[in-house]
Each structure stands twice: as structure tokens, then as C-alpha cells.
Image (tube, helix red, strand yellow):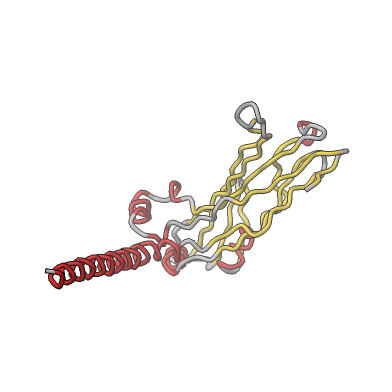
């Protein structure tokens, strides 16, 4: 009888051990599947805001930013075929308020249009009503990678001693593409290029910006 009880406990212990090993195996397989599914998205998102510098000049609050931006092979092919590529930068500046929602001071966006003309073999970068010729796609992207003197607001609207918080991002703006390309963009991670939001902050004091 004692031997039977020992054998029973041993079998029960082995069963628990097998279940634990099986559970770890299943969890490991799920992690591998998730990695395989999400990795293409991560690979397609090769963009990042690496530096932001707000400044005051000519009675305006200006913004400078450096962005790492690399296009996927699919985007390169599309651009070289003459398909216009659009990028939109979004910026927001708020004044934090502990008793209520933050007060939105600035909410703006800026859109570039990059297009290749096969007849003239020339690239052009359009920003609002201005279109600038460039010799290559890399030169065209330089204007987007280095945002300079983006005018956000009049400096007179800034309040002395107040702390301001902002954030910036850049994204491939597929909403401006032709409808057939928009459909392709929904089904391909190569067209989901976007930076994460990058935060910045400053205090306005004695007519200067203090980090």
C-alpha cells in the first residue's frame, strides 16, 4: 500500500512537470510567432527624430529638427517611377495645467511633396507653393531630414516664467497618395513609415528660451 502511494505521488509529480514543460514550450512558440509577425513592421519603420531645438528669432518661436529617414526598397522604386511621395511633419506645443487639460498653444503640420520627372531626369521637392529642383532622391530628402526655421507662433504670445511642452513627428502621408497606392499602403509595412513622437520642453524667461 505504501509503495502504491509513493508511486502515485511520483506519477502526479511527473504529470505536473510535463505540464510545466509543455506550457513553457507553448509560450516560447507564441513569442516566436509574435516576433515573426511584428518584425516586418519594425523593419519598415526606419525613421526617428534625433534632435529638436526651439529658438526665438524675429519675434517668432521657431523650430529646428534633425530626422533620420531611410526609405524602404519599395518606396525607392515607387519614387523612381515618378510616383509623388508625401511626408507630413506634425508639431504640438501645450502649456501644462495641473487643474485641467493642458492648454494647446500650437498645433501645426507641414507637408513635402517629392517627385521625379523622367523626362527632365530631375527631382523636385515641393513645400506649400515653393518647389525646389534637386539632382537626386537623397538630396531631395535632405530638406525633410533637416527642418529649419519652422515658424510656429509669435513670441509675444509666450508668457513669462511659463513652462511649455511640445512634441514632433514625421510620417509618410499616404492619405495624399493616389487611391490605388493607398490600398497597397494598407496591406504593406513598407508604406507605414513614421517616426515616434519626440518630446521637447522649454521655459520662457526674460525674452529667452530656457531648456
Residue 112 seen in this snapshot: no
The furthest residue to the top = 99
List x then y, in percent, for residue 189.
39, 60
List x then y, in percent, for residue 82.
45, 62
- Left or right of 16? Residue 114 is right
Residue 206 seen in this snapshot: yes
- Left or right of 125? Residue 147 is right
Q: Is residue 57 above or below residue 10?
A: above
- Left or right of 209? Residue 145 is left
Q: Out of 18 and 203, give the one closest to the viewer.
A: 18
List x then y, in percent, for residue 72.
46, 67
Q: How many marks?
A: 0
The furthest residue to the front = 1
- Left or right of 17? Residue 98 is right
Q: Out of 152 and 181, give the one closest to the viewer.
A: 152
Q: Is residue 50 above or below residue 167?
A: below
The residue under the point 74% across, 38% down is 163
The residue under the point 44% across, 59% down is 83
Q: Out of 181 and 208, give the one closest to the viewer.
A: 208
Q: Out of 78 and 9, give the one closest to the viewer.
A: 9
Image quarter where the N terminus lies is bottom left
The residue under the point 58% across, 49% down is 89
List x then y, in percent, for residue 191.
42, 58
The residue under the point 82% across, 33% down is 160
Amino acid at each position: 500500500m505504501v509503495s502504491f502511494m509513493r508511486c502515485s505521488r511520483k506519477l502526479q509529480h511527473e504529470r505536473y512537470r510535463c505540464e510545466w514543460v509543455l506550457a513553457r514550450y507553448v509560450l516560447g512558440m507564441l513569442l516566436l510567432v509574435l516576433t515573426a509577425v511584428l518584425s516586418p513592421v519594425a523593419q519598415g519603420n526606419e525613421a526617428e527624430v534625433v534632435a529638436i531645438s526651439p529658438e526665438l528669432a524675429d519675434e517668432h518661436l521657431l523650430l529646428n529638427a534633425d530626422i533620420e529617414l531611410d526609405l524602404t526598397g519599395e518606396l525607392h522604386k515607387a519614387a523612381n517611377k515618378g510616383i509623388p511621395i508625401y511626408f507630413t511633419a506634425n508639431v504640438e506645443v501645450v502649456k501644462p495645467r495641473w487643474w485641467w487639460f493642458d492648454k494647446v498653444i500650437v498645433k501645426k503640420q507641414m507637408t513635402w511633396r517629392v517627385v521625379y520627372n523622367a523626362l527632365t531626369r530631375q527631382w523636385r521637392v515641393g513645400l506649400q507653393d515653393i518647389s525646389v529642383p534637386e539632382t537626386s532622391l537623397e538630396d531631395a530628402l535632405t530638406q525633410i531630414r533637416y527642418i529649419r526655421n519652422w515658424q510656429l507662433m509669435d513670441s509675444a504670445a509666450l508668457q513669462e516664467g511659463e513652462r511649455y511642452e511640445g512634441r514632433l513627428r514625421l510620417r509618410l502621408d499616404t492619405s495624399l497618395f493616389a487611391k490605388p497606392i493607398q490600398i497597397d499602403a494598407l496591406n504593406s509595412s513598407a508604406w507605414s513609415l513614421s517616426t515616434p513622437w519626440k518630446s521637447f520642453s522649454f521655459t520662457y524667461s526674460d525674452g529667452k528660451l530656457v531648456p
